[in-house]
Image (tube, coloured by chain):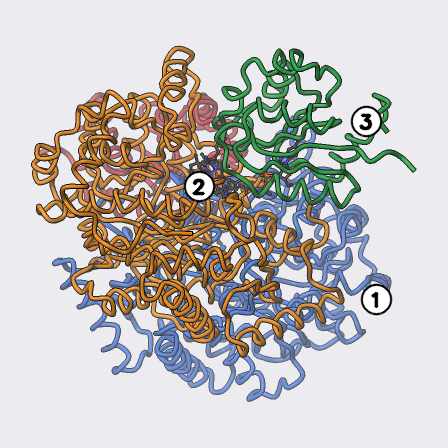
Chain colours: A green, B red, C blue, D orange
Amino acid sequence: MKKQATVITGTVGMDAHVIGTKILSRALKDAGFNVVELGIQVSPEEFTEVAKKTKADAILMTSLYGMAELDLRGFKEKCKQAGLEDLILYIGGVLGVGRQDFKEVEKRFKKLGFERVYPPEANLESVIEDLWNDLRAKGKT
Amino acid sequence: MKKQATVITGTVGMDAHVIGTKILSRALKDAGFNVVELGIQVSPEEFTEVAKKTKADAILMTSLYGMAELDLRGFKEKCKQAGLEDLILYIGGVLGVGRQDFKEVEKRFKKLGFERVYPPEANLESVIEDLWNDLRAKGKT
Amino acid sequence: MEIRVKQKRIDEERFLEMRKEVLAQWPTGKEVDLEEAVAYQLSLPESKNFMKVTEKARQEGETLIWPRAGTPVLEDEIALVKTLVDAGIRHIPVTIDSYTRLLQFEKAQQALEESIKTGRPMLNGYPIVNHGVKKTRKVVESVEAAFVPRGAGRLAMEIALASGMTAAGKSSLFEFGSYEKKTTLEECFEHSQYTDRLAGYYTERGAIISTDIHGLVPSGVFPFSVNIACIIIDSLVAAEQGVKSIMPQTHCLGHMAQDIAWMRLIPRLMREYLEKFGYKDVVVPGILANQIPLFPVPQGMGGAFAYLNYTAMVAALAEAEAVFVRTIDEGAGVATRESHALSYESANWILNVVRTQKIKCEIDGVETEEKVTDVEVRAILDKVLELGDGDVVIGSIKGVEAGVIDSPFSPNINIKDKVLGVKDVTGACRYLEFGNLPIPDEIKEFHREKIAERERAEGRKLDYQVAVEDLWALSKGRIVGAPSAS
Amino acid sequence: MEIRVKQKRIDEERFLEMRKEVLAQWPTGKEVDLEEAVAYQLSLPESKNFMKVTEKARQEGETLIWPRAGTPVLEDEIALVKTLVDAGIRHIPVTIDSYTRLLQFEKAQQALEESIKTGRPMLNGYPIVNHGVKKTRKVVESVEAAFVPRGAGRLAMEIALASGMTAAGKSSLFEFGSYEKKTTLEECFEHSQYTDRLAGYYTERGAIISTDIHGLVPSGVFPFSVNIACIIIDSLVAAEQGVKSIMPQTHCLGHMAQDIAWMRLIPRLMREYLEKFGYKDVVVPGILANQIPLFPVPQGMGGAFAYLNYTAMVAALAEAEAVFVRTIDEGAGVATRESHALSYESANWILNVVRTQKIKCEIDGVETEEKVTDVEVRAILDKVLELGDGDVVIGSIKGVEAGVIDSPFSPNINIKDKVLGVKDVTGACRYLEFGNLPIPDEIKEFHREKIAERERAEGRKLDYQVAVEDLWALSKGRIVGAPSAS
Ligand code: B12
Ligand code: B12
């Protein structure tokens, strides 16, 4: 049997849009993950602290309200400082204010340290597929 | 008192869209023109013949069905042959098949001998204004 | 004047004689082999039969979208119908270009060749005669949907039916009132008796060909009673020639109560008159709601979508079997494939969402509109039958001469054009000028009161100018015209 | 646990004390001079007063569009509201950015400055506190329309009202259920008693400030009875603080009969309860229909227009005074000015065309839905009042703890989340899990039957998965969800 991976979910910053992260969390649970569900308005610090404490394998962060970029300034460094180089980082939602070129958005968030970036039409089955692959690649399962 | 100008209206070729030319004709009458209303499906030859016979000052041709360009091949020459160099030629309607760049359309029909070319949103008051100006410029009123 | 044509079935021998002449009009006529064509029709699946597709929609409580599909080049036409079917379309009306409609096959051929050469469509539709049977079967076979030719003359209809199209939208009064300039109604009856007989011929052999019937003139702001009378006349004419499936088209002129009333009234009256004249086995598979009023530019994208979605909404609330919505390109020209897809995606959203709810609604005024129109239609038909001494064909011909059948804004010089319509305060169409229409006095009074009401509300007389303003209303986001309109 | 807050008007002295604290939260607080602000309000024309604009719409039989308008940079905000007013808008809700909503004025300031510098809006709304009174008056004075701040906290409300905005859309239960994570309902009541009292203060001096009330959670597929109970609770709370004009917001969840039933029920029940508790001079100027279900991507342009047109249509048929339609950009992010203009042009087409017709229609099912919801709402309110011993504030706090007020998909950890809704075969919202909601048994039975009917039709059990499918339905052009949904 493969090891049960631990993943963290929640919306970052001041974002109150809870539906997406709730549905995502449930889908992850149904897929067999150990999900630490932080809900809305999780600060970057809280994400990293909980990641350390729970020895999480991945964070699946949500943001819809458009201000994630502001919320996540310097996030990559914080992760490094916390010794979380190995943590898999995903983010999904509406990642800017107004219509955006998704390629641009993706680039911006990859720079912030996210391995994968998803638009709101992301299909959760393939998200979970991606996650399995990335976990496997990092020898985490 | 200025001379009453004679103008010819009608749709060219096989076009059956009568509403526009009817409304235009009525507006011209109301504005004091002597209107020779030919109705739909007038051939280029009929237009020039009637113009000669009635000593018309202008033709206001309509086409909506998209095939005016085909119908009007060689029209300029026909007018010249008929000695109608002085006749004022306007055309209005949907002058091509499908969405068109109006500037392109205008160019095409100007080449065919039309002095002015109008899109379907043409305002009839300003059309009549233009007509007065052109008539005056050619010393026809 | 002697009237040659009558309400009488063309006899077989004469029909087969006539066919020879018709098929000789253009080389592709030779491709039509009637018996082979019947067999081909019988081999087609139900999903390609117009009547069956319509009846299925009725049973399943769906409203189907009628697009408009006609572009000259064969490959483009195939690509277009595929786009449509991908967008959920199951009825495909094929617009035939204007040259073909008027039998100018030579000109159509040149323009077709030029379209192929330049890559720019030079024709406003699909030149079915020039393409012929073999090529048109490729179109029909390329998708799962029922095909209906639009504006097919006799040869065009021969080719359409031999190619597997299963409806024959051609009606005398519509041709006469909307497309022709000098042609008489008598000539139009002759033409459509032929095409109806052809449909009847297939039908008798088991290949049911429907016909859809449109009225007289889509003249916009004008009460629909003349058109309904014409729909009924043309149904009787078709039925006499052996047509067994007739689909009426109504016009959605924008006023919900009126539009819905007409959708209810038309099939009811059609069935009644067909029955009365002994055509007891004719099916009326459904009603097609047609978005008629102008969609002129300037029509911003927002207004264009609203307008077509509104029409879809009205059709859905009326539980119409089909709706002919315009595309967002309607005011600009023949639609691009993208505009088709986008427009029907939008209309289908409305249709699906509304029909799934199985909404039953009673709108105030529907009953009154239905009653008023019912009286008007009967009055016109009574007069027509009286003029024809019981023969609906002869009566119609005389009726047009007498202005008993009349319309504003027709291109045909044989139509009196002594009538006019305007809107009332709520946007319903009312008669402003009755001409010689045999409308009963109490109904005339009803219209006059509605007109007076608007005159009071706006403090002005309603006249021709107002009729023109009203014509533009919907395209400007209003249901009642306003003075600023051009 | 001791409950500090009660249904009782804050006394003047304490209120003025509290105001000092609030105004000290950010330097722009100093710009608020209450007496000068009242005078400024009294100097504004009626066209800027929310209640008067709404009542005018009611009298003239119009449905006004609520847009959403909030962008960080002052000049952009002014350009935006001008675009809106040019598109026929007369109510302007100003979205306040999320930092400001959560009192992070420092962060908002940085982001505002950065937005100015980069030309890219970094905030999802208008940071009203940072802009302050003088600048915000420029916005209010730039057009003829009534302004409503969205999501204003105490200081934001002070600035909004002093700047000439004339409504105070802030309600305890909505803040609690939709925007907050750990904040208790008690704290939310304290906050909105303050803002309501502020509105009352202006009102007593002749400057009528309205408040609009939203419910608990816009959670999509969930019967509306809990939200209606919350709307009534929040109205009572506002009325106690001296608010004299209260506008309820209903959610258009897509099912016409339900949406219309709720629009009818809410003002009626509100008036009844306000009356019952002695708030006899409170006006309910109209109802705002809010297009709530998700508008997620992928939403093609066709579907986007259809969706907003449909909402406009339902609001128009229900004769709502106002409708909050989404723009075609809803799924993509904060709308561009062009999207605003296009979307409202489209919705206005529908609203004008439908309202001019003065359509009265009876839709089957409206009566049943109204009755069912009426019973549910009364049951919830009875229980709340019982728990509070007649005090609606205390009762609500206890009600949330007891799950008598509950909702799925709330971000607030203090909400039980033991309930769930799904759709029935026609797309109406039904309770799948009742949690501790005090719904009477015969009504529970009604929901269960509807659920069973869909289970039979689809041959599967309805569960959480189906609830998620239903959540996506409208954005995929359906009213009932389908398995393929992601
Ligand atoms: C009504 C209508 C019909 C009716 C016509 C009834 C009749 N006999 O008049 C019927 C149903 C018969 C019909 C038939 C066809 N139609 Co048609 N029809 C329309 C429609 C909906 C409205 C046209 C109209 O009456 N406009 C109102 C009048 C008042 O406006 P107007 O003619 O533009 O005139 C105004 C101005 O242009 C100006 N004006 C007019 N002439 C002139 C001349 C001058 C010199 C000046 C200055 C100004 C001027 O003054 C007028 C008043 O403001 C249009 C689409 C639309 N716009 O909504 C399609 C449309 C014109 N039709 C079209 C087509 C293709 C056809 C058909 C081939 C097939 C079909 N769709 O059925 C046949 C062709 C018949 C034929 N042989 O011509 C296309 C043309 C496509 C293109 N050019 O790319 C259109 C654009 C629809 C579309 N998008 O596909 N049609
Ligand atoms: C419902 C809603 C609200 C509700 C939220 C209720 C609640 N507490 O959840 C309320 C009314 C409270 C609200 C408030 C606000 N909202 Co709002 N809201 C929406 C709306 C309509 C739906 C969002 C939603 O629930 N989607 C459904 C869920 C299931 O989808 P999802 O969250 O995208 O999640 C899916 C995927 O993205 C994916 N996913 C999610 N997370 C992750 C993470 C990873 C790693 C992966 C792989 C996948 C993944 O899985 C999910 C399931 O498929 C959207 C517009 C829309 N899309 O229709 C606007 C929207 C998100 N809101 C917006 C805004 C601006 C606000 C407000 C600032 C102002 C306002 N409009 O009231 C406030 C902000 C509050 C705050 N502090 O955050 C904007 C954001 C603008 C932008 N980014 O440019 C939007 C887009 C609307 C708009 N066009 O203006 N909102």
Chain bearing tag 2 is D
Q: Could you tell whether D206 is left or right of B6 in the image?
A: left
Q: Is residue B20 shown to the viewer in this render? A: yes
- The percent position of residue C248, horizontal first and vertical second, equals 55, 69
Residue A135: numbered disc? 3
- The residue that mark 2 highlights is D183
On what subunit does the disc labeled 3 rest?
A
Discs 3, 2 touching: Cβ within 8 Å: no
**Which mark, residue C282?**
none
| Label 3 to label 1: alpha-carbon separation | 59 Å
Q: Residue drawn at (59%, 58%), measured in percent from left and top? A: D420
Q: Amino acid at mark 3?
A: Leu
What amino acid is at disc 2?
Thr
Between marks 1 and 2 in the image, the one whose residue lies nearer the viewer: 2
Compared to D412, does C285 lie above or below? below
Horizontally, residue A128 falls left or right of residue D433, namely right
The one of C3 and C319 positioned closer to us in this rendering: C319
Numbered tag placed on residue C42 in the rendering: 1
Residue C215, given in percent of the width and then of the height, sits at 48, 66
Mark 1 vs mark 2, CA separation in Å: 72 Å
